[in-house]
Amino acid sequence: MLDYIKKMSFKKKILSSYILFIGISCLLIAIYILKSMESAKEESYSYMYQFGEQVSMSTDVIVSNMDRIRFLHFIDDKIKHMLRRSMEDKSMEELLDENDYIERALNHMTNMNQYVVRATIVNEYGDVYSNVLTNNDAYLEKMEEIDKAQDWTDKNKVYYTGVYQEEIYLLPFEMVTSISKMYDINQEDYIGTLYIDLNFSSIRQMLDRLAESKTSRTKLLIFDGNQEVIYDSEGWEEGAWEQMDEGERAAVRDFLKGSRAEPGEFTMRGKKCLAASVRNETTDWQIMAWMPLSDIYASGWKNMVGIFSAMIMLLITAVFLGIYLAGQISRPVMILAKAMGQVDKGKVNLLEQEKYSWQDEMGLLFRSYNEMGKRINDSIEKIYIYQINQKQTELKMLQFQINPHFLYNTLNTISSIAALSDIEEIVKIADNLSGMFQYNIKGDDIVPVRKEIQHVKNYLEIQAIRFPGKYRFEYRIDPEVEEKKMLKFLLQPLAENSLQHAFGKMKEINTVSLTAQEDGKDIIFRLRDNGVGMKAEQAEELNRELAQTDTGTLVNHVDKGIGLRNVNARIKNLYGKEYGIQIWSEEGEYTEIQIRIRKMEWQDDSEGESI
């Protein structure tokens, strides 16, 4: 393709450039229109989501003062005592007085909410109190069946049924019932169950008014907690849900199970639609506002057709203008183009100016081309020399780098000389330090537990030699864990913290103990000292901070040193959020640091042992 372009005449190139320019312009405009359509889609989703939020808030307003009915036994202590006694234990006069008293109280509360039709209380003895005198055993049996199917672990739970038909005084009603439990003030003693019946016909009228106040393109579907439709803004018989097939309904239900913050796209009645879903936390209803994509894109398509028509006319004009201008280009341009096409890689070939006698702008262009070519050639040569010198300098610098093995080899030499001189302390401290250097410089991040333990022992033995008689170190390591794998450099930083911070006030016996044992699929390390400890508030705050560390935390963003937070972040990054560090402490008595990691099997091969 490139060779073909080089062989094209300049006239064709100019003409092609005009066509390409107009084509790119058309493409950019098309992209702009598509972006505008996407923006319209996002705005429509935002609008529908806000509409769903408005419907949810209106639903909250409907049920807002129903809590006064639920807490009636708190508001009126007399009613609570009435409910706690069985009707069998009451005289007929007491029974009539109490029924009348509770009925009037319920009437007073239900009259405060125009959507509430009836409130019924069934106490712990099965006695029924209601503000509407009905003897509907089928209703109570239905409510009891729904009640038993619920999980009432949460004592503050309020369950809303789906829409069902019910008769009161021989009048048919569409009902939605809220079911809640009544407890004493201590939330332990069960008093009874409260059923509050809402007139869903009135709720539907309120929803219809909300839907009519919005644009006619936005439709509304409301689902109960069992994902059954309880409201369709397009009506029931002609509504969207009734006209959808099972596949379309399944797609809608899958969308309702997903994230509420994401828009949904699926087919409804054969049309691609956009939807937004909002869950009402009070009733557990899911409110879905939807709109056909064709309605969203309609205005965008009209604008796109008009713009493309104008671009086609502009393209035709540009083609004729390109043909005219291309015919005015003279031969010097072709010569210069040919010279530039023959430029070798890495060097610019210069033109022979004596061969051409043009003194106009083209002659100036030739001279400028040659001057530019000379500067480019000089720059290429200078860069080449600089790169050679730079490589030579880098090779020299490599010769002065220190071999890290020199450090522990030197320590081994010191250990050998100390052994010959029978100075046991120097032998121990040199061997331990050499072991620590060797452990540090190896590149493996996962090591056997026994090597990590040995690394801690090397460090603590050095401290024991530095401060003779001041510390006592104890180790209780379960042999089962020694050959398991673990992340490197977890224990020694914590042991160093203990020595630095725990013994500000030295005791008669300053003890640091390290234990390791299996716990199911985990390994638990405990590092305990009998130092100064810390206040309970300080330990709680530190544990809260350690528990909140995220698995994506960068360890160099945690703290400057390799302390508790750093080790905790490394553990969570590798093992997961449920693992990490926990601290127990008592001021003036002790501090215990627990490290929990996941058990990793270790294979003792040559590769794994190269620590």
Image (cartoon, grey):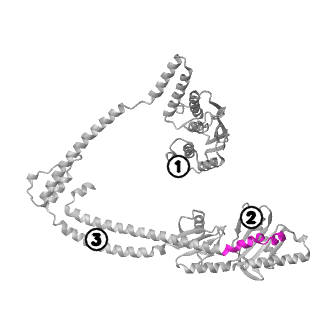
C-alpha span from label 2 to label 3: 71 Å
Residue closest to the eye, 145 or 204: 204
Q: Are marks 1 and 3 in contact (CB under 8 Å)?
A: no
Classify 254 as above or below 118.
above
C-alpha span from label 1 to label 2: 44 Å
Farthest-out residue, front: 505
**Count of marks placed on residues:** 3
> How far from the left and from the top, in percent, is residue 315?
28, 71
Q: Which residues are magenta?
A: 62-83
Indicate the secondary structure of the residue bearing disc 2. loop
Q: Which residue is mark 3?
A: 315
Q: Nearer the viewer, mark 2 or mark 3?
A: 2
Classify 433 as above or below 345.
above
**Which residue type carries mark 2?**
Ala
> How far from the left and from the top, in percent, is residue 376?
21, 48
Farthest-out residue, right: 91
**Which residue type carries mark 1?**
Thr
**Which residue type carries mark 3?**
Leu
Mark 2 Cα within 10 Å, few/some/many (few <14, many 20+)?
few
Taking the spot 69% from the left edge, 78% from the top edge, the residue there is: 115
Q: Which residue is mark 1?
A: 553
> How far from the left and from the top, in percent, is residue 498?
60, 38
C-alpha span from label 1 to label 3: 55 Å
Taking the spot 78% from the left edge, 74% from the top edge, the residue there is: 120
Residue closest to the eye, 322 or 464: 464
- Quarter the N terminus occupies: bottom left
Q: Which residue is mark 2?
A: 149
For the stretch drawn in magenta, what is the main secondary structure?
Answer: helix
